Image: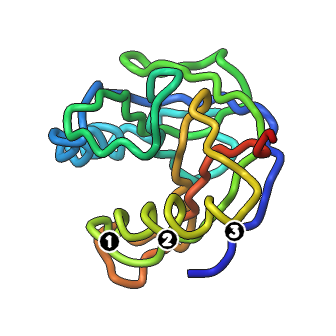
Amino acid sequence: MQKPRIVESLPKILVGLHLEMTYATSALTGKLWSQFMPRRMEVTNAVSQDKYSLQVFKNGFDWNSTDAHTQFVKWAGMEVNDKNSIPDGMQSFDLEGGLYAVFIHQGLPNAFPKTLHYILNEWIPSSGYEPDASRPQYEVLGEKYMNNHPDSEEEVWFPIKKVRH
């Protein structure tokens, strides 16, 4: 896996659907996306056709925890210009800006744990950065994303901050 690019992201407004889940119930992700995708064209003020998949953890979340019962809120959405036209049944999410390491995940969704393992156990320890648990981790599903295809690519935006000595 290649080294990430480091990006200072501006705040974004997302509009979409969300569900509470745990790692043990993460199969609900498919349900969430199957509800959002047929309705995505209702998001009339989208910045692009890119889709965002966010994992919002409670502040202080430990990225090294592998507890299957860790709760988080999963979002399926798109970036919008403003909150003026949110489709019925959807909600907005204010994604604050900040420092992110952006990785490329290539392959099937079931290979994502390997990407996350690389980020947490290989890249982070030698990077001079640490996870910023106060901000969401998310994926941008752009034009190279092909659902459940081995050649699919998505950007993994991992929140980071400089290590304080």
Classify 164 as above or below 87.
below
Callouts 1 and 2 close, C-beta under 8 Å:
yes
Labels in figure, total: 3
Residue furthest front in the image: 165
Q: Badge 1 is on which residue? A: 111
Q: Earlier in the sequence, mark 1 or mark 3?
A: 3
Instruction: Check residue 105 in the rendering and tell me which mark sits there, or answer none.
Output: 2
Amino acid at the residue labelled 3: Pro
Q: Badge 3 is on which residue? A: 4
Left or right: 32, with 99 as reference point: left
Q: Earlier in the sequence, mark 1 or mark 2?
A: 2
Quadrant of the rendering where the C terminus is positioned: top right
How crowded pointer 1 is (Cα within 10 Å; few <14, some 14-19, many 20+) is rated as: few
Q: Position of residue 126 (x, y in %)?
A: 68, 66
Left or right: 1, with 95 as reference point: left
Q: Examine the image and state in which quarter residue 65 appears.
A: top left
Q: Nearer the viewer, residue 165 or 22?
A: 165
* Residue at position x 81%, y 37% in the image: 10
Q: Examine the image and state in which quarter residue 111 appears.
A: bottom left
Spatial CA span between label 1 and label 3: 18 Å
Q: Secondary structure at mark 2?
A: strand
How crowded pointer 3 is (Cα within 10 Å; few <14, some 14-19, many 20+) is rated as: some
Q: Earlier in the sequence, mark 3 or mark 2?
A: 3
Amino acid at the residue labelled 1: Ala
Left or right: 46, with 10 as reference point: left
Spatial CA span between label 1 and label 2: 9 Å
